[in-house]
Image (spheres, rainbow, N blue to C red):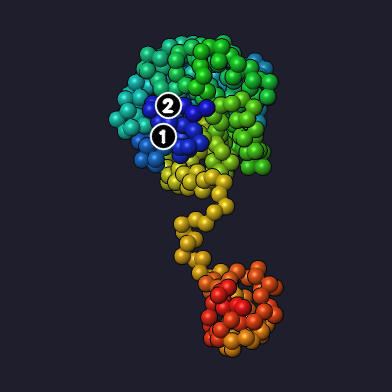
Protein backbone atom coordinates (compact mmCIF):
# COMPACT_ATOMS: atom_id res chain seq x y z
CA UNK A 1 0.00 0.00 0.00
CA UNK A 2 2.84 2.41 0.71
CA UNK A 3 4.08 4.96 -1.83
CA UNK A 4 6.07 8.19 -1.85
CA UNK A 5 5.61 11.86 -2.65
CA UNK A 6 8.72 13.69 -3.88
CA UNK A 7 10.87 10.84 -2.57
CA UNK A 8 9.36 10.82 0.94
CA UNK A 9 7.98 7.33 1.68
CA UNK A 10 4.48 7.15 3.13
CA UNK A 11 3.09 4.23 5.10
CA UNK A 12 2.84 2.60 8.50
CA UNK A 13 6.60 1.98 8.63
CA UNK A 14 7.33 5.71 8.36
CA UNK A 15 6.46 8.76 10.48
CA UNK A 16 3.17 10.42 9.50
CA UNK A 17 3.30 12.56 6.38
CA UNK A 18 2.19 16.04 7.42
CA UNK A 19 0.59 18.47 4.97
CA UNK A 20 0.14 22.14 5.87
CA UNK A 21 -2.87 23.54 3.99
CA UNK A 22 -2.51 27.25 3.15
CA UNK A 23 -5.92 27.46 1.47
CA UNK A 24 -7.20 31.05 1.73
CA UNK A 25 -5.00 32.05 4.67
CA UNK A 26 -2.69 34.04 2.38
CA UNK A 27 -5.32 36.83 2.72
CA UNK A 28 -4.61 38.03 -0.79
CA UNK A 29 -0.85 38.54 -0.76
CA UNK A 30 1.94 36.38 -2.15
CA UNK A 31 4.26 37.60 0.62
CA UNK A 32 1.95 36.17 3.27
CA UNK A 33 1.57 32.89 1.37
CA UNK A 34 5.36 32.66 1.20
CA UNK A 35 5.65 33.41 4.91
CA UNK A 36 3.17 30.65 5.76
CA UNK A 37 5.11 28.22 3.57
CA UNK A 38 8.40 29.11 5.28
CA UNK A 39 6.87 28.92 8.78
CA UNK A 40 5.33 25.55 7.94
CA UNK A 41 8.66 24.21 6.70
CA UNK A 42 10.32 25.38 9.91
CA UNK A 43 7.62 23.53 11.88
CA UNK A 44 8.70 20.23 10.38
CA UNK A 45 5.94 19.46 7.87
CA UNK A 46 6.58 17.34 4.81
CA UNK A 47 4.42 19.29 2.37
CA UNK A 48 2.53 22.52 1.86
CA UNK A 49 -0.67 22.45 -0.16
CA UNK A 50 -2.37 25.09 -2.25
CA UNK A 51 -5.74 25.25 -3.98
CA UNK A 52 -5.77 25.91 -7.72
CA UNK A 53 -8.88 27.51 -9.17
CA UNK A 54 -10.26 30.83 -10.33
CA UNK A 55 -13.65 32.10 -9.20
CA UNK A 56 -14.95 31.60 -12.75
CA UNK A 57 -13.77 27.97 -12.86
CA UNK A 58 -15.45 26.98 -9.60
CA UNK A 59 -18.73 28.94 -9.82
CA UNK A 60 -20.38 31.79 -11.70
CA UNK A 61 -20.99 35.40 -10.73
CA UNK A 62 -24.65 35.07 -9.81
CA UNK A 63 -27.05 36.19 -7.08
CA UNK A 64 -29.71 33.54 -7.55
CA UNK A 65 -30.84 30.92 -5.02
CA UNK A 66 -28.00 28.75 -3.74
CA UNK A 67 -25.29 31.22 -4.68
CA UNK A 68 -25.29 32.90 -1.26
CA UNK A 69 -24.05 30.84 1.70
CA UNK A 70 -26.42 30.26 4.60
CA UNK A 71 -24.95 29.26 7.97
CA UNK A 72 -21.41 28.44 9.03
CA UNK A 73 -18.34 30.69 9.06
CA UNK A 74 -19.10 32.15 5.62
CA UNK A 75 -22.76 32.97 6.22
CA UNK A 76 -24.07 35.66 3.89
CA UNK A 77 -21.14 35.53 1.48
CA UNK A 78 -21.75 35.12 -2.25
CA UNK A 79 -19.90 32.08 -3.58
CA UNK A 80 -18.26 34.12 -6.31
CA UNK A 81 -17.03 36.79 -3.90
CA UNK A 82 -15.72 34.21 -1.43
CA UNK A 83 -13.77 32.34 -4.09
CA UNK A 84 -12.46 35.58 -5.59
CA UNK A 85 -11.04 36.42 -2.17
CA UNK A 86 -9.83 32.94 -1.33
CA UNK A 87 -8.24 31.74 -4.56
CA UNK A 88 -4.50 31.48 -5.05
CA UNK A 89 -3.57 33.44 -8.20
CA UNK A 90 -1.99 31.18 -10.77
CA UNK A 91 1.08 33.38 -11.14
CA UNK A 92 1.92 32.67 -7.47
CA UNK A 93 2.30 28.95 -8.04
CA UNK A 94 5.73 28.90 -9.67
CA UNK A 95 7.48 30.98 -6.97
CA UNK A 96 5.81 28.97 -4.20
CA UNK A 97 6.83 25.68 -5.81
CA UNK A 98 10.36 27.01 -6.25
CA UNK A 99 10.61 28.15 -2.61
CA UNK A 100 9.33 24.81 -1.42
CA UNK A 101 12.08 23.00 -3.33
CA UNK A 102 14.64 25.33 -1.77
CA UNK A 103 13.35 24.48 1.70
CA UNK A 104 13.09 20.74 1.04
CA UNK A 105 9.29 20.77 1.37
CA UNK A 106 6.98 19.31 -1.28
CA UNK A 107 4.43 21.76 -2.67
CA UNK A 108 1.33 20.44 -4.39
CA UNK A 109 -2.26 21.51 -4.83
CA UNK A 110 -5.94 20.69 -5.21
CA UNK A 111 -6.97 21.29 -8.82
CA UNK A 112 -10.63 22.11 -9.36
CA UNK A 113 -10.84 21.75 -13.15
CA UNK A 114 -8.81 20.57 -16.13
CA UNK A 115 -7.04 23.89 -16.64
CA UNK A 116 -5.77 23.71 -13.07
CA UNK A 117 -4.44 20.19 -13.70
CA UNK A 118 -2.64 21.48 -16.80
CA UNK A 119 -1.03 24.29 -14.81
CA UNK A 120 0.11 21.97 -12.03
CA UNK A 121 1.40 19.43 -14.53
CA UNK A 122 3.51 22.13 -16.18
CA UNK A 123 5.07 22.80 -12.76
CA UNK A 124 5.94 19.09 -12.31
CA UNK A 125 3.67 18.78 -9.27
CA UNK A 126 4.66 15.75 -7.14
CA UNK A 127 1.04 14.78 -6.28
CA UNK A 128 -2.54 15.85 -6.84
CA UNK A 129 -5.04 16.39 -4.04
CA UNK A 130 -8.74 15.98 -4.74
CA UNK A 131 -10.71 18.18 -2.34
CA UNK A 132 -13.66 16.74 -0.44
CA UNK A 133 -16.32 18.56 -2.41
CA UNK A 134 -14.74 17.37 -5.68
CA UNK A 135 -14.64 13.70 -4.64
CA UNK A 136 -17.79 13.16 -6.75
CA UNK A 137 -16.25 14.84 -9.82
CA UNK A 138 -15.24 11.58 -11.48
CA UNK A 139 -13.99 13.16 -14.75
CA UNK A 140 -11.68 15.40 -12.70
CA UNK A 141 -10.38 12.41 -10.72
CA UNK A 142 -9.84 10.38 -13.89
CA UNK A 143 -7.88 13.21 -15.51
CA UNK A 144 -5.69 13.80 -12.44
CA UNK A 145 -5.09 10.06 -12.13
CA UNK A 146 -3.86 9.91 -15.71
CA UNK A 147 -0.99 12.34 -15.07
CA UNK A 148 1.31 9.76 -13.45
CA UNK A 149 1.43 11.21 -9.97
CA UNK A 150 0.10 9.99 -6.59
CA UNK A 151 -3.45 10.98 -5.79
CA UNK A 152 -4.66 12.10 -2.35
CA UNK A 153 -8.46 12.18 -2.02
CA UNK A 154 -10.39 13.76 0.86
CA UNK A 155 -13.71 12.10 1.67
CA UNK A 156 -15.71 14.79 3.48
CA UNK A 157 -19.41 14.76 2.50
CA UNK A 158 -18.87 11.62 0.35
CA UNK A 159 -20.63 8.43 1.36
CA UNK A 160 -19.22 4.92 1.09
CA UNK A 161 -20.46 4.32 -2.47
CA UNK A 162 -19.08 7.66 -3.65
CA UNK A 163 -15.69 6.89 -2.10
CA UNK A 164 -15.67 3.52 -3.84
CA UNK A 165 -16.48 5.21 -7.16
CA UNK A 166 -13.63 7.69 -6.70
CA UNK A 167 -11.14 4.88 -6.00
CA UNK A 168 -12.37 2.86 -8.97
CA UNK A 169 -12.10 5.81 -11.35
CA UNK A 170 -8.64 6.71 -10.08
CA UNK A 171 -7.48 3.16 -10.79
CA UNK A 172 -9.15 3.20 -14.20
CA UNK A 173 -7.20 6.39 -14.90
CA UNK A 174 -3.96 4.53 -14.25
CA UNK A 175 -3.21 5.62 -10.68
CA UNK A 176 -2.36 2.98 -8.08
CA UNK A 177 -0.62 5.33 -5.63
CA UNK A 178 -3.76 6.48 -3.85
CA UNK A 179 -4.31 7.84 -0.35
CA UNK A 180 -7.71 8.54 1.14
CA UNK A 181 -8.04 11.21 3.81
CA UNK A 182 -10.90 10.59 6.21
CA UNK A 183 -12.51 13.99 6.51
CA UNK A 184 -15.51 15.69 8.08
CA UNK A 185 -16.29 18.87 6.16
CA UNK A 186 -17.59 20.87 9.08
CA UNK A 187 -15.81 24.18 9.61
CA UNK A 188 -14.89 23.68 12.39
CA UNK A 189 -15.63 20.00 13.04
CA UNK A 190 -16.74 19.03 16.58
CA UNK A 191 -14.35 16.37 17.89
CA UNK A 192 -17.30 14.09 18.70
CA UNK A 193 -18.04 13.92 14.96
CA UNK A 194 -14.50 12.95 13.92
CA UNK A 195 -15.22 9.20 14.12
CA UNK A 196 -11.56 8.27 13.81
CA UNK A 197 -12.31 4.54 13.91
CA UNK A 198 -13.32 5.01 10.26
CA UNK A 199 -9.62 5.26 9.37
CA UNK A 200 -8.88 1.60 9.99
CA UNK A 201 -12.10 0.47 8.34
CA UNK A 202 -11.36 2.56 5.26
CA UNK A 203 -7.87 1.07 4.94
CA UNK A 204 -9.26 -2.46 5.19
CA UNK A 205 -12.06 -1.81 2.69
CA UNK A 206 -10.05 -0.12 -0.03
CA UNK A 207 -6.50 -1.38 0.42
CA UNK A 208 -4.93 2.08 0.25
CA UNK A 209 -3.08 4.37 2.62
CA UNK A 210 -5.52 6.33 4.79
CA UNK A 211 -4.98 9.53 6.71
CA UNK A 212 -6.94 12.47 8.07
CA UNK A 213 -7.85 15.87 6.70
CA UNK A 214 -8.70 17.61 9.95
CA UNK A 215 -10.94 20.59 10.62
CA UNK A 216 -11.29 20.23 14.39
CA UNK A 217 -9.89 22.90 16.69
CA UNK A 218 -6.49 22.23 18.23
CA UNK A 219 -4.17 19.27 17.78
CA UNK A 220 -5.61 16.42 19.87
CA UNK A 221 -7.62 14.79 17.08
CA UNK A 222 -4.73 14.56 14.57
CA UNK A 223 -2.49 13.02 17.25
CA UNK A 224 -5.20 10.49 18.08
CA UNK A 225 -5.60 9.73 14.38
CA UNK A 226 -1.94 8.77 14.08
CA UNK A 227 -2.29 6.50 17.10
CA UNK A 228 -5.16 4.82 15.25
CA UNK A 229 -3.15 4.30 12.08
CA UNK A 230 -3.37 7.48 10.00
CA UNK A 231 -0.29 7.71 7.78
CA UNK A 232 -1.03 11.21 6.39
CA UNK A 233 -2.44 14.24 8.19
CA UNK A 234 -3.51 17.51 6.61
CA UNK A 235 -4.21 20.61 8.69
CA UNK A 236 -4.96 24.23 7.79
CA UNK A 237 -2.25 26.69 8.81
CA UNK A 238 -2.14 30.46 9.21
CA UNK A 239 0.31 32.94 10.67
CA UNK A 240 -2.06 34.45 13.24
CA UNK A 241 -5.74 33.67 13.64
CA UNK A 242 -6.40 37.25 14.72
CA UNK A 243 -5.46 38.37 11.20
CA UNK A 244 -8.72 36.86 10.00
CA UNK A 245 -9.49 35.31 6.65
CA UNK A 246 -11.96 32.70 5.39
CA UNK A 247 -10.20 29.75 7.07
CA UNK A 248 -8.52 31.39 10.05
CA UNK A 249 -10.92 30.10 12.71
CA UNK A 250 -10.00 26.42 12.24
CA UNK A 251 -6.32 26.88 11.32
CA UNK A 252 -3.20 26.33 13.43
CA UNK A 253 -0.54 28.93 14.08
CA UNK A 254 3.11 27.89 13.47
CA UNK A 255 3.90 27.14 17.13
CA UNK A 256 0.84 24.90 17.34
CA UNK A 257 1.77 23.25 14.06
CA UNK A 258 5.26 22.42 15.33
CA UNK A 259 3.79 20.91 18.49
CA UNK A 260 1.34 18.85 16.45
CA UNK A 261 4.13 17.51 14.21
CA UNK A 262 6.22 16.52 17.23
CA UNK A 263 3.28 14.96 19.08
CA UNK A 264 2.15 12.98 16.03
CA UNK A 265 5.62 11.56 15.55
CA UNK A 266 5.66 10.58 19.21
CA UNK A 267 2.27 8.91 18.74
CA UNK A 268 3.63 7.04 15.72
CA UNK A 269 6.63 5.81 17.71
CA UNK A 270 4.33 4.79 20.56
CA UNK A 271 2.19 2.63 18.24
CA UNK A 272 5.12 0.26 17.85
CA UNK A 273 4.17 -3.38 17.47
CA UNK A 274 2.38 -6.08 19.43
CA UNK A 275 4.93 -7.05 22.08
CA UNK A 276 4.48 -8.66 25.50
CA UNK A 277 8.18 -9.04 26.20
CA UNK A 278 10.29 -7.04 28.61
CA UNK A 279 11.44 -3.73 27.13
CA UNK A 280 14.99 -2.37 27.43
CA UNK A 281 13.80 0.49 29.64
CA UNK A 282 12.30 -2.05 32.06
CA UNK A 283 15.38 -4.18 32.58
CA UNK A 284 16.78 -2.17 35.45
CA UNK A 285 13.46 -2.17 37.27
CA UNK A 286 12.87 -5.92 37.24
CA UNK A 287 14.69 -6.11 40.60
CA UNK A 288 11.83 -4.24 42.24
CA UNK A 289 9.27 -6.95 41.57
CA UNK A 290 8.18 -9.08 44.53
CA UNK A 291 9.84 -12.41 45.24
CA UNK A 292 10.16 -14.91 48.12
CA UNK A 293 12.54 -13.87 50.92
CA UNK A 294 13.49 -15.30 54.26
CA UNK A 295 12.20 -12.80 56.82
CA UNK A 296 13.34 -14.66 59.99
CA UNK A 297 16.40 -16.86 60.51
CA UNK A 298 15.70 -20.49 59.57
CA UNK A 299 17.67 -23.42 60.97
CA UNK A 300 18.56 -26.48 58.88
CA UNK A 301 15.56 -28.83 58.87
CA UNK A 302 13.13 -26.16 60.10
CA UNK A 303 9.79 -25.88 58.34
CA UNK A 304 9.10 -22.97 56.02
CA UNK A 305 6.07 -21.02 57.23
CA UNK A 306 4.35 -17.70 56.65
CA UNK A 307 6.30 -16.40 59.65
CA UNK A 308 9.74 -16.95 58.12
CA UNK A 309 9.06 -16.67 54.35
CA UNK A 310 7.16 -13.85 52.67
CA UNK A 311 6.63 -12.27 49.25
CA UNK A 312 8.42 -8.91 49.39
CA UNK A 313 10.56 -6.62 47.28
CA UNK A 314 13.25 -6.88 45.79
CA UNK A 315 12.91 -9.53 43.13
CA UNK A 316 15.93 -11.83 43.46
CA UNK A 317 14.16 -14.80 45.04
CA UNK A 318 11.68 -17.34 43.77
CA UNK A 319 8.54 -15.98 42.11
CA UNK A 320 5.62 -15.37 44.51
CA UNK A 321 3.54 -18.02 42.71
CA UNK A 322 5.70 -20.70 44.36
CA UNK A 323 4.76 -19.71 47.92
CA UNK A 324 1.92 -22.27 48.31
CA UNK A 325 4.27 -25.01 47.04
CA UNK A 326 7.11 -24.37 49.48
CA UNK A 327 5.18 -23.70 52.71
CA UNK A 328 5.50 -26.72 55.00
CA UNK A 329 8.68 -27.98 53.39
CA UNK A 330 11.96 -27.94 55.33
CA UNK A 331 15.12 -25.93 54.91
CA UNK A 332 18.08 -27.87 53.49
CA UNK A 333 20.55 -25.64 55.37
CA UNK A 334 20.53 -22.62 57.68
CA UNK A 335 19.17 -19.54 55.90
CA UNK A 336 19.62 -16.04 57.33
CA UNK A 337 16.97 -13.33 57.45
CA UNK A 338 17.12 -11.16 54.30
CA UNK A 339 18.22 -14.02 52.00
CA UNK A 340 16.38 -14.46 48.68
CA UNK A 341 14.90 -17.94 48.82
CA UNK A 342 16.03 -20.36 46.12
CA UNK A 343 15.29 -23.99 45.32
CA UNK A 344 18.73 -24.96 46.66
CA UNK A 345 17.61 -23.75 50.13
CA UNK A 346 14.70 -26.19 50.26
CA UNK A 347 14.95 -29.91 51.10
Instruction: Describe residue 56's horizontal placement relative to residue 95 as left or right.
Output: right
Are the two marked residues, 1 and 2, in contact with CB atoms closer than 8 angstroms? yes
- Pick the front one: 54 or 259: 259
- Pick the front one: 273 or 256: 273
Residue 46, labelled with which disc? 1
Q: Residues within 10 Å of mark 2 (few under 14, many from 20)?
A: many
Say which residue label 2 marks. Answer: 5
- Pick the front one: 69 or 58: 58
Q: Position of residue 46 (x, y in %)?
A: 41, 34
Q: Is residue 2 visible?
A: yes
User: Residue 329, relative to residue 77: is it above or below?
Assistant: below
Residue positioned most to the left: 102
Alpha carbons under labels 1 and 2: distance apart: 9 Å
User: Residue 336, relative to residue 142: is it above or below?
Assistant: below
Q: Position of residue 242 (x, y in %)?
A: 47, 42
Q: Residue at x 58, y 81 (%)?
A: 332
Q: Residue at x 35, y 36 (%)?
A: 38
Pointer 1 or 2: first along the chain: 2
Q: Residue at x 60, y 75 (%)?
A: 292
Residue 310: which quarter of the image?
Answer: bottom right
User: Residue 194, relative to residue 28: is it above or below?
Assistant: below
Local secondary structure at mark 1: loop
Amino acid sequence: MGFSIAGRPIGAAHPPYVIAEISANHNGTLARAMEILEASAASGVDAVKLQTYRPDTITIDHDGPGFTIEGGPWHGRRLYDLYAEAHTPWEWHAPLFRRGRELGVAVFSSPFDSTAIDLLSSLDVPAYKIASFEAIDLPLIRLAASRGRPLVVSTGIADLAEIADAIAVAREGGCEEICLLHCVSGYPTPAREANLLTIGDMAARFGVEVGLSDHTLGTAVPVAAVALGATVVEKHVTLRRVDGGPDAEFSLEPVELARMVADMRTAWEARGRIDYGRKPSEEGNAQFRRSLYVVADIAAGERLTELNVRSIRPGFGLAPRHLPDILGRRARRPVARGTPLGWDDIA
